[in-house]
Image (cartoon, helix red, strand yellow):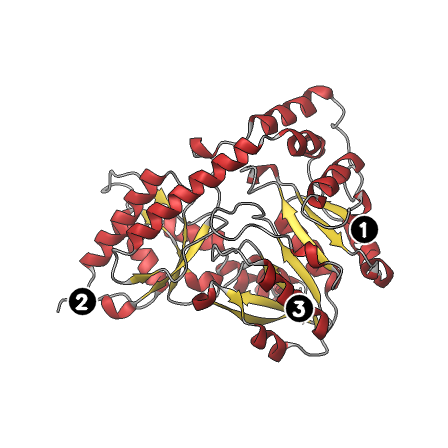
Amino acid sequence: MEKKLSKWGFNNGDLKEKSLFSIRSVLKMLMENLKEDDDNRSKIHLGRGDPSAIPCFRTSSAAEDAIYSAVKSAKFNGYAPAVGLYSTRRSIAEYLSHDLPHQLSPDDIFLAPGANQAIEVVMSVLARPGANILLSRPGYPFYEARAACSNLEVCHFDLLPEKGWEVDLESVEALVDDNTIAIVIINPGNPCGNVFTSEHLQEIVETAKKLGILVIADEVYSHLCFGNNPFVSMGVYGSITPMLTLGSISKRWIVPGWRLGWIAMIDPSGVLKKSGIAECLQDYLEYSANPATIVQGAVPHLLEKTSKDFFSNINNILKEAVEAFYTKVQEIPCLTCPYKPEGAMCVMIKLNLSFLEGINDDMQFCTKLAHEESVIILPGMIVGLKNWLRVTFAMEPAILEEGLERIKAFCLRHTISS
């Protein structure tokens, strides 16, 4: 039987390698290291960006009303067009246009069942033999997994912690060659919690124009900002160079399970339409999965009726959590937070192994922490920085503080004796 099976020629090589180090697979492994019987304390999960089950992060009443009305109307029980319902695309175009100097049209919007699937669509459409794409280090690992599936080579440029995780533009210029198709920019930053200034965004766009590469602007965490830098959409600079913007309702409305994202063409000069990218996106969506029609039907009401108070409240909760986090982490000798988060839901912390005994790397740190303290955090190697840690602060402040107290106790227990 084994001999016959070998003739099938199946080899899951790159995909299997990537899946072994996905956020979900690592979190699952860490959860399996929790002590179920001996530790009666609550488990504190600071490893994923989904606070939807936490009462203070409950979605807006407008969102709940929107989904209820969509169901009751019986208008959204059938299939939707491949690119999405016109009314939904129109409402998203209007919503995004508030942040732009020009107006988007429904034809500029393509719907997908979540931002991850939007990434899949874009990667698949842009892929060609020998092509490469520029991704940040640290970054969001789903891009690398999808690049592997599309046979795209990945080249990494650095984000600079000492400069608020700005893009190292010199490293970008050194990486680009004739086969480079695009650069991905995540703002607000996942996993760093940074928010780029408008000046730095313009520098990035001008660099992309000079190098002749497409910008993919990941703005999934748009407007989740609570520091000194306000959110500025990279699309503000769409007249300099065209770009594709990726977004979703998952984070700002705290509904990741609703699975609705989008690709927006920021193309005031019509370059992307002339090049055929718009047509290729539409063609790809003809045979890919679509967001649930019920959720599409709810989006116009959700976008138009959610109050500013809801958004302000979420940002205030995140800001309070960051203040508690940043103060507490200063008390832990083996951890350094080079940048106080100003946006999104997570932050990168540097792990100083020279302070610790019996811990060799970030994965071992997280595994032992889960087992000894029932606290889950993500090893930095998963997002591209070995011996760093990614911590999610989208948590009730009291629980976040308890989690950090346990991390502190763990570190003190494993500190090398002088």
- Name the residue: 14% across, 66% down: 417
> How far from the left and from the top, in percent, is residue 225?
51, 47
- Which mark lies nearer to you, 1 or 3? 1
Q: Amino acid at mark 1?
A: Gln
- Residue at the spot of label 1: 282
- Position of residue 398 relative to residue 157, above or below, is above
> How far from the left and from the top, in percent, is residue 260?
65, 41
Residue 30 shows which numbered tag? none
- Which mark lies nearer to you, 2 or 3? 2
Residue 416 shows which numbered tag? 2
Q: Amino acid at mark 2?
A: Ile
- Name the residue: 60% across, 37% down: 258
Between disc 1 and disc 3, whose residue precedes?
3
Helix, strand or loop at label 3? It is loop
Residue 10 lies in what quarter of the image? bottom right
Q: Quadrant of the N terminus?
A: bottom right
Q: Is residue 255 left or right of residue 91?
A: left
Helix, strand or loop at label 1? It is helix
User: How far is disc 1 from disc 3 in space, using C-alphas?
Assistant: 21 Å
Q: Circle 2: is it few (<14), some (14-19), or many (20+) Cα within 10 Å?
A: few
Q: Amino acid at mark 3?
A: Leu
Q: Circle 1: is it few (<14), some (14-19), or many (20+) Cα within 10 Å?
A: some
User: How far is disc 2 from disc 1 in space, using C-alphas?
Assistant: 58 Å
Q: Quadrant of the C terminus?
A: bottom left
Taking depth in this image into account, of 4 and 381 the one nearest to the observer is 381
- Residue at the spot of label 3: 152
Identify the residue at the far top of this view. 72
Taking depth in this image into account, of 240 and 373 the one nearest to the observer is 240
> How far from the left and from the top, in percent, is residue 329?
30, 54
Residue 68 lies in what quarter of the image? top right
Helix, strand or loop at label 2? It is loop
Q: Are marks 2 and 3 in contact (CB under 8 Å)?
A: no
